[in-house]
Amino acid sequence: MTEMRMRDALREALREELIRDDRVFLLGEDIGAYGGSYSVTKGLLEEFGEARVRDTPIAESGIVGVGVGAAMAGMRPMVELMTINFSFLAFDQIVNNAAKLHYMSNGQITIPIVIRMASGGGSQLGATHSHSLEGLYAHFPGLKVVCPSSPADGKGLLKQAFRDDNPVIFIEHTANYGLKGEVPEQEDFLIEFGKASILREGRDVTLIGYSGSVHQAVRAADLLAEQEEIDAEVIDLRTLRPLDMDTVIESVKKTNRAVVVEDDWRFGGFAGEIASQIMEKAFDWLDAPVARVCSKDVPMPYNRNLEFAALPSEEDVVEAVLAML
Amino acid sequence: MTAKERRPRSKETIDQYLLSEQQLEEMYETMLLARRLNERMLALNRQGRAPFFIGGTGQEAAQVGAAMSLKRGEDYLVPYYRDLAMNLVFGMSAREAMLNLLAKKDDPHGGGRQMPSHWGVGSRKVVTGGSVVATQLLHAAGIALAAKMSSDPIVVLTCCGEGSTSKGDFHEALNFAQIHRLPVIFYVQNNGYAISESTEKEMPIAHVADRARAYNMHSASVDGMDAIAVYQTVKPAVDQARRGGGPFLIEARCYRLGAHSSDDDDSRYRPKAELEEWTQKDPITLFRRRVETDKVFPPEELDEIEERVTAEVQDAVEWATNQPDPAPEDALGFVYRE
């Protein structure tokens, strides 16, 4: 184990994959000499050269479309998009092409592409850099959606993404890039998709999060333990497609209460999917309706006070838990 | 009369054509087969036997001349939905074309999962795409990038209509391909219409080929109603791309003699006189007149080809109609590669 930050863990994963498989190459804006907008690809150009670490024009549809074509032809490209909001410029290439061509071609075409993008608020980047739209991509059959919350998960899941034969949307929370954590060093460290992790065991309520919201859930669990003597279980979904509902349902059957925490909007968001499935699969075990703690229904504002008012906080989670007891 | 009984065609190049007798025969037969298939497909649609049809009538020369410039089985073809004739060059049979139209279980392009005319067969290096125009140009650039990275001496030819050249993906593809000097031919079949919009409503320039200037790219504009001229233009571009000379934008000036699709009534926007004028330039009639005048083939041999093609289309319809549809449970497969 080595302590490293999220961005360094992600870089280690890319480095190891570039060494392991010569079909792997990287495409994106400013990923070369600049080292990527969040320094994830720093140093990789020097180590692997321009053929495998390619700076691209600022043209999101173009970057993804070229990546899709290269993947069709047997390569294993990784495409970096600066933020999830910018990915809308490539939405057609992602959801109409990458997600569907395996199906439409009757299984003839496979598109093993990893599309990385940053999401999440809290970094004062305004309404067109800061949204959390993991659930939006999870809506589309044909895509896998991965959203790590810790450096170890970041490394293990990103390495796994390169071994998957499907398009993988790999979403990194901007507030997590500097987060430190212990990361296993061995090169075969992989984390299977569709396996949630239980970050904290508890009896009284299940808090469910992914990506950045996992940290609100963990802090809320601490507050509940310290201030209210409530013992919360915290589940990190890690991947939204495939989705590990078994772990969630098992937990809810033990705690009889659930709160879904996410940075996305509440209306039509992924928390609604989780809540529905809990209702379908564990209705008789529930002592209260499933609660959702999400961001306010506004585009993300810039000013710090406004931004924090829009995002869900650990206090909001505590409040939701107290309301259901 | 079967193919075996006919006079064997010479493989020797006829100087003024830069094509052999055998290639000229293939050119004629393929154009004719595409035309007869398109006619029959539209008829099947009007009879209620095929839910949707989109055709390439009038574009046969543009398609056959270009596709014959490629190495079949080695080079990639990333077509658009009018490229029936290109697919015939790449090995599709009349029976297969009908399986695709009728979305039968054994349609090798999609097994009924895709709309018709979104062709793609891996073994032939023909790659399918979606219906959003110009998206496939980026895939072609990506395939060419993969080939370049693997030092694979292949060329990718991708097609679109002139309407697609107003799309961002068109420009992003040309830009990327030229920056990286990729072996890809962007082949634009300028058929005069983007559904109902004539070219002056689509773009402020007279020739699609002029768009290459913005990317410092080689370009050519060719009479797309002349299969031989098309071949003579596209072949050197393909050869140059194969040698590492970078991408090429080629405009084939042709005409959509049919409606946009089976859902379109072109009489609402197309002047009758214009259609009549272009009908005079029908690429198949022009080709036949030329090879007859030059005495490449005697007329009776061209008639024999015509008879053979007609019989082939008839057989294909009868055969394909009786092939099984996919079963309802087939809808659930191939969402993910397991």
Image (tube, rainbow, N blue to C red):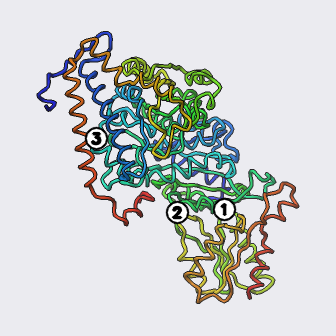
- Front residue of B283/B145: it is B283
Q: Name the residue under label 1.
A: A181
Relative to A322, A99 lies left or right: left
Rate crowding at label 2 as few (under 14), some (14 to 19) or many (20 or more) other CA atoms within 10 Å.
Answer: some
Q: Name the image quarter holding the N terminus of chain B.
A: top left
Q: Name the residue under label 3.
A: B94
Q: Which amino acid does label 3 sit on?
A: Ala
Relative to A91, A110 lies left or right: left
Instruction: Please tell me in which quadrant of the rendered image residue B311 appears.
Output: top left
Chain that bears disc 1: A
Q: Which residue is drawn at 74% across and 51% down?
A: A129
Q: Which amino acid does label 2 sit on?
A: Ile
Rate crowding at label 3 as few (under 14), some (14 to 19) or many (20 or more) other CA atoms within 10 Å.
Answer: many
- Front residue of A52/B264: it is B264
Task: Please report whichever mark, 1 or 2, sits nearer to the chain's N-terminal start.
Answer: 1
Chain that bears disc 3: B
Measuring from the top left, give residue B257's x and y in whole percent: 44, 31
Q: Name the image quarter holding the C terminus of chain B.
A: bottom left
Label 3 to label 1: alpha-carbon separation: 62 Å
Q: Which disc, if any, is residue A191?
A: 2
Q: Are marks 1 and 2 in contact (CB under 8 Å)?
A: no
Q: Which amino acid does label 1 sit on?
A: Gly
Question: Is B46 located above or below residue B269 in the figure?
Answer: below
Q: Which disc, if any, is residue A44?
A: none
Which element type, helix, strand or loop, lies under badge 3? Answer: helix
Which element type, helix, strand or loop, lies under badge 2? Answer: loop
Q: Which residue is drawn at 70% across and 84% down?
A: A231
Instruction: Please tell me in which quadrant of the rendered image residue A316 appears.
Output: bottom right
